[in-house]
Image (cartoon, rainbow, N blue to C red):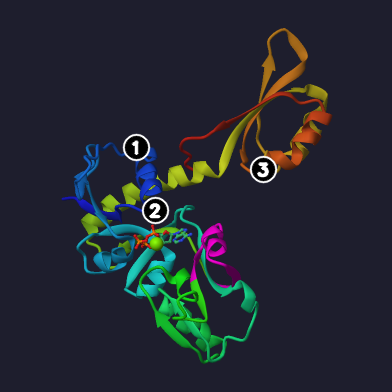
Amino acid sequence: MKLTLAIQKTGRLAEDSLELLRKSGFKFEITDRSLTFSINNFPLEIIFLRADDIPEIVADRVADIGICGQNTVEEKGYKVRELEALGFGKCSLCMAYPEKQKKVSLSGKRIATSYPRLLGKFLKKQKISADIVDLSGSVELSPKLNIADCICDLVSTGSTLKNNGLVKGETIFKSEAVFISNDQISTEKQALLDKLLFRIRAVLTARKYKYIIMNAPRKNLNEIQKCIPGLKKPTIASLFADTDYVSVASVVEEDFFWTTIERLKEVGASGIIILPIEKMIL
Ligand code: ATP
Ligand code: MG
């Protein structure tokens, strides 16, 4: 028995999805034109699809699990379970207006989007009545072509909007890539899925942390400990032939050191080394 995982063939989620599998210790080789491939060291088959088709494929049990954007899961509305947010493919579904038009009322406007369901929900909640122009692609061109007055589209950096003379407006949905599964998975498959998720979660947890090692004066250990949030149980090792200094090592959250590095140096820390962690099981 095998699990089948659907991932995007080409596009914004494709590389990161494969990278997550690789980092989680799944071994595979991909030949250029293949639409499916097997993992060598786990009962897992991968199928490549368009990101938009993944929720339906998982809901229909053609695949047991999948990786796609939350935006797609919400828009399609199929019954699937969202198991884990993956921290990549981050984007927002936003309103955007032609530069000259600036901010106007949406009431009675033609709004082009590939997300009619999410936009419809937003408009309903805001009690706005407007025309939704449902387009499957190139939404950003529609105001220029006079098909729409403004648009509602996915934005990450905003450069596509800018290149098309559009200004970002209100955000209606925030999204990132998620791991989804069919909601009626067999007990045997669930056992495999638990093993697979365990590995993936070890990689996701590790991404949030770094390993820090530094030399510090023994007398300032209290100060050092105060500088580093989460440094509750550091490993303290003596330095050979030096009784005044110790080596301090701990796991810390990624963002911490840019805010406290100055203070650490002030209290005498030196030789500070920060290392990535590959896998972490809490
Ligand atoms: P295609 O563009 O090939 O028709 P697609 O739009 O489904 O297909 P991508 O453009 O690769 O494929 O987008 C896939 C997913 O990547 C989106 O559904 C979304 O979750 C995520 N994403 C992240 N940033 C962006 C962005 N700036 N624009 C669009 N999608 C983004
Ligand atoms: Mg696209």
In magenta stretch: residue 161: yes
User: Residue at image x 39%, y 53%?
Assistant: 13
Q: Give x and y (percent) for residue 271.
A: 70, 21
Q: Which residues are magenta?
A: 153-172
Q: Earlier in the sequence, mark 1 or mark 2?
A: 2
> Would you name the residue on which mark 2 appears?
13
Q: Nearer the viewer, mark 1 or mark 2?
A: 2
The reply to whether discs 1 and 2 touch (Cβ–Cβ < 8 Å) is: no
Of discs 3 and 1, which sits in the foreground? 1
Q: Amino acid at mark 2?
A: Leu
Specify the farthest residue to the top: 241
Labelled disc at residue 230? 3
| First in sequence: mark 3 vs mark 1 | 1
Do callouts 3 and 2 mark residues in contact (Cβ within 8 Å)? no
For the residues marked 1 and 2, what is the alpha-carbon distance in whole angstroms? 19 Å
Tell me the element at label 3. loop
Q: Residue furthest left?
A: 1
